[in-house]
Image (cartoon, grey):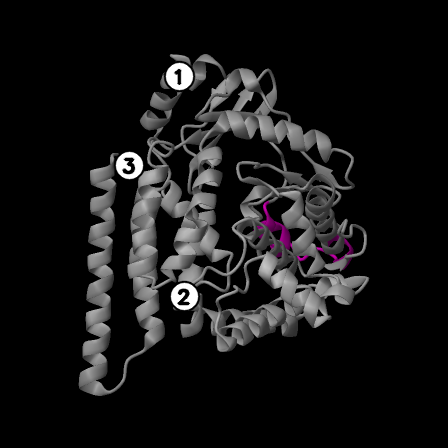
Amino acid sequence: MKEQSRIPTGKVKRAAKYVTTSAKVSKNYLEHYAKKMWTGQANESILHQKNAQDIFDSLAELKGSALKVAQMLSLDSNSLPAEYLNKFAEAQYSTPPLSYPLVVNTFKKSFQAGPLSFFDSFSKQAVNAASMGQVHKASKDGMDLAVKIQYPGVSESVKSDLKVASLVAKNVLKLNPVEIDHYLEEVEERLLEETDYTHELSRSMELSSLCGDLDNIKFPQYFPRWSSKTILTMEWMHGDHMGPFIAQHPSQHSKDRVGQALWDFYQYQIHELKTLHADPHPGNFIIQEGGKVAIIDFGCTKKLPYDFYQSYFKLLDPNSFRVSQNRDQLFLELGFIHADDTPEERKFFSDTITETIELLGRPFYQSTFDFSDEAYFKEIFRLGERLSRSAVLRQSKHARGSRHALYLNRTFFGLYNLLHQIQAKINTRKYLPNI
């Protein structure tokens, strides 16, 4: 993939890129509706594909917060049509890397010297490039290292990027503006943490220690002396990313072992620590020999307020949730329904949330669950498609759900998708909610 020699920085340059992209999307819409008017036929899927490509190309050049939001949307099957989700998923693994001179400049800003002043070797080309930074392979005293380099201007542009990105979400993607505004503060808070590698270093070392006794889970060693606000150095974890692991057609035992390790890792954090690794995309995991899973990125984490945790996981308690009075109270506490909703709105959102919870909570209602079940994931997909096109959701005068649920829901969606890709059968009773 061609390297990128510069990134647009500054509010004006980055905003101008959004304006250009919006113009391209508007042109796509005009062509679509003109064809529909003259021929009576137009393929909406093609329109979505063109728009998704134009938006993704722009975000890939800008990198940073806006591209990270696209990656988040790719894990949320309720937000957008499939054409957008599929394209935005590329933000996890397929963005143009920065050229080596820019990497050297980042080192000099942090350490007043280039990378070869510290390491015995350092790859000039990135081995992986994602939304907020890229990874280079290095070595020191016989140890292989992974060095994550943050893209220039990412930290300084979070607030301005999100403001413009929210306009694109509202005006181009046609998402509910009330929902966007409701969650914007939560997204901004997480992204500001994610652009501070000193914060990631601290959180990585803390959670690695707290989760260190989990079966089949491994963590790299971290090196504070070679880390800064924009550079993070850790042990290189040997093994395969999720895609190559699956492509080797591992045995069902191996798939179940890897899947169970991931399930236990997430459930332990959620229910024991009330803190979670909130970025469950495939690039953040390395599958090692013997079915062990190495966790290599703690950039995005979320602490769960105890009151929210209690209410949220009561939704998964059949004895509580299936009593309508209890269910309505929980829906009010969590912001799924509101006191001033009309009877029609209350029924629609109560029915929709009930359907969603019963579907996504299904793995918890039995001792084992087979995530290879295609019928189950088709149900999830159909629900997501229906909700992404719901005029009632898009026109709601209230956001639906606590802001604290944003990253928790994202985590569950991402984990389910991972387990489905692996085709794992899981013991879901090992860790249960503490309610």
| Percent x, y of residue 254 | 75, 52
Closer to the camera in the image, 16 or 342: 342
Q: Amino acid at mark 2?
A: Glu
* Residue in the picture at 49% in, 69% down: 341
| Percent x, y of residue 51 | 30, 63
Q: Which label belongs to residue 83?
A: 2
Task: Choose top left, top right, bottom left or bottom right for residue 88.
Answer: bottom left
Q: Amino acid at mark 3?
A: Ile
Task: Choose top left, top right, bottom left or bottom right for residue 416.
Answer: bottom right
Q: Is residue 349 left or right of residue 181?
A: right
Q: Are marks 2 and 3 in contact (CB under 8 Å)?
A: no
Above or below, comparing residue 381 to residue 166 in the picture: below
Residue that lies at the very extreme toward the bottom in this rendered image: 40
Closer to viewer: mark 1 or mark 2? 2
Does residue 208 appear in the picture of this structure? yes
Closer to the camera in the image, 202 or 186: 186
Mark 1 — residue? Answer: 114
Closer to the camera in the image, 159 or 77: 159
Q: Amino acid at mark 1?
A: Gly
Q: Which residues are magenta?
A: 241-254
Q: Which label belongs to residue 383?
A: none
